[in-house]
Amino acid sequence: MKPETKRKWAWVAGVATAALFVALLIWGPWLLEGRHIRDKHGELVSSAGIIITGLRTALLAIAAGAIAALGLWYTHKNHELSREEQVTDRYVEAIKLLGSENLHERLGGIYSLERIMKDSEKDQVTIIEVLAAFIRTPTSEQKQALIPAAQPEPEDSDPEDSADPLPVDVQAALTVLGRRPDPDGTPTADLRRIDWHNADLEHANLQHVDLTGADLRGARLRGADLKGTNLTGVRLRGADLRDADLQGADLRDVDLSRVDLRGVDLGGVDLRAMNLVRVDLTGAQLVGADLRGADFRSTHLRAANFTGAQLMNANLTAVDLTKVILRAADLRGAHLGMAHLVDADLKEADLRGAQGLTYEQLVHSKLYDDTSLPKELRTDRRIKNHIKNCKAEARWREDLETPKS
C-alpha cells in the first residue's frame, strides 16, 4: 500500500473513532445505565445526574489513557526511527573511512563499525561480512606489507624468525571480528582462501572463522583461538600452532606434517584416519578426540592427554607414550607393537584386541582393575601382580596428597 493511501485511511480511522467516542459520551450512559437512572414510572431518579457524570468521567479517563498510550507509542516509534537513521549515518561514514588511503582513517572506520555492531544487533551480520571482505581484499598499501604469494614454501626456517606481522588495519579488523558479541550465535566470518603464509597470528582470535583453503604455511599461530574454526583444506606446512585452542575445529583434508602442535588443544576434534606421522603433539590435549585409524608413527606424544579419545585401529607402533594419559580411551585393535608405555595412565582404557602389546610394555604403565586387556594378558599372573602394585601406589599417593587434619 502506498504511503499516501495509508495516511488517507489513518485520517478516516481517526475521524471515525472520534465520532464514535462523542456518540458514546452522549448516549453511552443512557444505553449502559438507563434502567438505573429512571424509576418504574419512567421518571429520572434523584441520583441520575451523578451516575451520568460518573460514567462520562470514566469514559473521558479511558480516552485520555488511550491517547497517552498512543502518544508514548508514537514517541517510541519516532525514537526508533531516529536511532536507525543515526546508525545508518554512522555506518555510511564508517564505510567511507574504511575505503580511505589514510591508515588512521581506516582504523577509525574499523572501530566505528565495532561500536555499531555492539549497539545494533540487527546490523551485526552486515558488519561481520564487511570486515571479512576488508581483510580478504587488501589495499595497495597493505599489499606492500604482505609477503608476496610467490615466495617458496618454508622448509626448515624458524617461525619465530620468519613470521611477518599483518598490516595494522587488517590486524585491527581481525581483532574486532574476534570481539564480536556472541561468536557462537553470530555467522561465521568468511576468510576462505586467504593468503596468510608466514604471517604472525600469535594469540589471534579466529574462533568460528571459515578459513577453508587458506594458505597458512609457516604462519605463527602460537596460542591462537581457533575454536570451531573451519580449517578444511588449509595449508599448514611448517606452521607453529603451539598452545593453540582447536576445540571443535574442522581439520578435514589438512596436512599436519611438520606442524608444531605442542600443547595444542584438540579436544573433540575429528581426526579419523589422519596422517600424523612425525607431528609434534607433546603435551597436547586430545580429550574426546576421534582418532580412529590415525597414523601416529614417529609422532611425539609425551605427556599428551587422550582421556576418552577414540583410538580404535590407530597405528601407534614404536611411539613414545611416556606419561601419556589414556584414561577411558578406546584402543581396541590399535597397533601398539614396541610402543613405550612408561607411566602411561591406562585407567578404564579398553585395550581389547590391541596388536603387538606385551607384558614387558605393560609392566611400566599404570594398570587398574577397570583396564580392559587382551585375554592372554588379562589372565597373566604377572599382570595381576602389577595391577595390585599400581593400586597400592595410587592409595599411597592419595594418602600423601590428602591434608592431615
Image: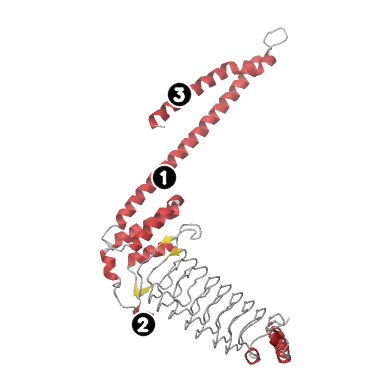
Q: Pick whichever of labels 1 and 3 is earlier in the sequence.
A: 3
Q: Residues within 10 Å of mark 2 (few under 14, many from 20)?
A: few
Residue placed under numbered mark 3 in the picture: 12
Q: Mark 2, mark 1: which one is toward the viewer? A: 2
The image quadrant where one finds the C terminus is: bottom right
Label 3, secondary structure: give it. helix
Residue placed under numbered mark 2 in the picture: 155
What is the number of the mark on residue 255? none
Where is residue 103? Give x, y as percent.
29, 63
| Gap between marks 3 and 2 measured at Cα | 80 Å
**Vertical relation: 67 (above or below) 157:** above
Residue 315 vs residue 169, the one in the foreground: 315
Label 1, secondary structure: give it. helix
Tell me the kind of residue under disc 1.
Answer: Arg
The quadrant holding residue 125 is bottom left
**Vertical relation: 389 (above or below) 262:** below
| Gap between marks 2 and 1 measured at Cα | 55 Å
Specify whether 142 is left or right of 64. left
Where is residue 163? Give x, y as percent.
35, 77
Specify whether 400 is left or right of 116. right
The image quadrant where one finds the N terminus is: top left
Q: Give the number of callouts.
A: 3
Q: Pick whichever of labels 3 and 2 is earlier in the sequence.
A: 3
Where is residue 124? Give x, y as percent.
43, 54
Q: Mark 1, mark 3: which one is toward the viewer? A: 3
Where is residue 4? Give x, y as percent.
38, 29
The quadrant holding residue 179 is bottom left
Residue placed under numbered mark 1 in the picture: 83
Q: Pick whichever of labels 2 and 1 is earlier in the sequence.
A: 1
Tell me the kind of residue under disc 3.
Answer: Val
Label 2, secondary structure: give it. loop
| Gap between marks 1 and 3 measured at Cα | 30 Å
